[in-house]
């Protein structure tokens, strides 16, 4: 498995079917469209200039929306994942 | 529903009719025109460099003006929403 | 009315006649020319990194000069206003 | 008169004759040439991130050199002035 | 050997065969693909603005993923290495 | 004379003959070549975000190397000077 | 000799023969290739925003790797040197 560093999270993108099931659809407009995924692992968090480490406000299993063009792709045991920064996560689907 | 992260807010854009009713019209000029909407959910707020979390100065139900090209579109149960940063909100209509 | 957020102010631009009356004329040169207006509402102020909120050094009724291309236009009850950041205000006419 | 905000100063540009009298001439080279002027009013000063206001190191009457393309033009009672940031002032002629 | 300065690490890139063995494959997509390597040496860490030195969250022997275009190449005794900043390391393979 | 503001220094550029005498020659390469000069006046120093003023590590009479394209030209009593920021000074010739 | 200011160091670039002797070769790839040199003089160090001066983690005699296109060339008594910032030094050869 991957342990993300600092303010990074590993996310498994969700295919379109699951997206429809949760009632959330990403419209086809001119603006940047977010994508859905499930958090798989979270880093230790961002380090503030005063030396304080800020825990990432996410946990494994969270369904999240993230900016479509953010992050780095990676494939582990034939499954695709994304490594994103916490700031690329827009919100949690609850 | 969406729980926005950090300094983000979820806003439901208002159609033009409601805009007229409140007496506010966005003129057609060369400058960037703001758009109106209703706050649906607010994040936990921006984190300062000293570790202090600053609550967003908005609450669900607030009618707000925001920069037209800001944010990410999303559709939940056939309703369109926007995920914006607090700094993209210009003001509250009172 | 509009309650501006943070370091923003709502300004009502002054037409050219009033500008002449106050003895201030904006010359026609190659440099960016400021515009005059009257402050209508001020936000709660900018937030410093130490968590201190700094009140805006302006009050409703102040006649101000501001950068011509700054801010967002808005029309309330047929009157045009501008939403500006405090840093776009150059000075107060006294 | 104009009360400049924050780290801004109002400067009255000096015509070329006065420049010659003080023994300072701005050469005609490829580099950016500074211009001379007299400080007319100073703002309350820049605000540091720790909340401390730093008085501008200039007073009305100071003859200053400033970057030629800096600032905003304004004309008061037929006299031209410039609104500059303190950081655009290179030095004081003593 | 190289002692990296500050927030830098020396990494020995891993050839594709070892990558396959660990079950991690880097897919061929439009996004930037990370590369794998083994940490060989770590610097003393980043210095915060408060004067605190933050140890790098990595140790020699760690298998890491890093951004493909990051860092500087160097060859020591016929072996190629990369000098990267800690922020170019995406995560640790565990 | 000129009193430079903040982190600025006034430098009198040295002609090429003096440069040769001190044994330092600026080679003709693709990289940016520094120029030599003598410090004539120094400002009060840079102001840190904590409100502390940091004295400039230079004094009148110091021979310095500076980046060739930095600063503003000025001519006082037929002598050419440069107003530079302390950070444009590369080092002192001792 | 040159006394570098602040976070700068004076480095004497090493010719290719010495590079080979130490067993380190800089490969010919598309990435930016570092260059080797010997530290001749170090400045007083970078100044943090809290007023603390941070000594440069290098001393005269250190063999260093640095980014090829960094710094300013200078020739003293017919010998070529480079003035670099500490952050352009990638690591020390030990």
Image (cartoon, coloured by chain):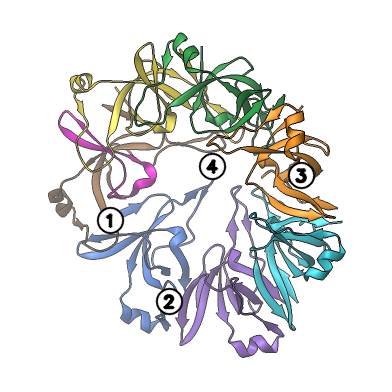
Chain colours: A yellow, B brown, C blue, D purple, E green, F cyan, G orange
**Same chain check for tags 1 and 2:** yes
Q: Which of G79 and D65 is in front in this view?
A: G79
The label nearer to you, 2 versus 3, is 3
CA distance for labels 1 and 4: 28 Å
At horizontal 46% and vertical 9% (from top left) the residue drawn is E21
Q: In which quarter of the image is residue A34?
A: top left
Judging from the image, mark 1 belongs to the subunit labelled C
Image mark for residue E1: none
Q: Name the residue under label 1.
A: C1
Judging from the image, mark 3 belongs to the subunit labelled G
CA distance for labels 3 and 4: 43 Å
Q: Which is nearer the N-term, disc 2 or disc 4?
A: 2
Do the numbered discs 1 and 2 sit on residues whose CB atoms are within 8 Å?
no
Q: Is residue B77 magenta?
A: yes
Q: Nearer the viewer, residue E78 or F50?
A: E78
Does any portion of residue F54 appear in the rendered image?
A: no
Kindly state the secondary structure of the residue where label 2 is placed. loop
Q: Give the range drawn in magenta.
A: B65-93
The label nearer to you, 2 versus 4, is 2
At horizontal 66% and vertical 72% (from top left) the residue drawn is F73
Do the numbered discs 1 and 4 sit on residues whose CB atoms are within 8 Å?
no
Q: How crowded is mark 1: few (under 14 residues within 10 Å), some or many (20 or more)?
A: some
Q: Mark 2 points at which residue?
A: C30
Q: Name the residue under label 4.
A: C51
| Residue F49 locus on image (x, y percent) | 64, 49
| Residue F93 locus on image (x, y percent) | 83, 57
């Amino acid at each position: 498995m991957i342990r993300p560093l600092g303010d990074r999270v590993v996310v498994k993108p969700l295919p379109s079917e699951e997206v429809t099931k949760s009632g959330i659809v990403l419209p086809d407009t001119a603006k940047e469209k977010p994508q859905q995924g499930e958090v798989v692992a979270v880093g230790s968090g961002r380090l503030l200039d005063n030396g304080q480490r800020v825990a990432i406000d996410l946990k494994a299993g969270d369904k999240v929306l993230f900016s479509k063009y953010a992050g780095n792709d990676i494939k582990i045991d034939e499954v695709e994942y994304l490594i994103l920064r916490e700031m690329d996560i827009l919100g949690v689907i609850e």
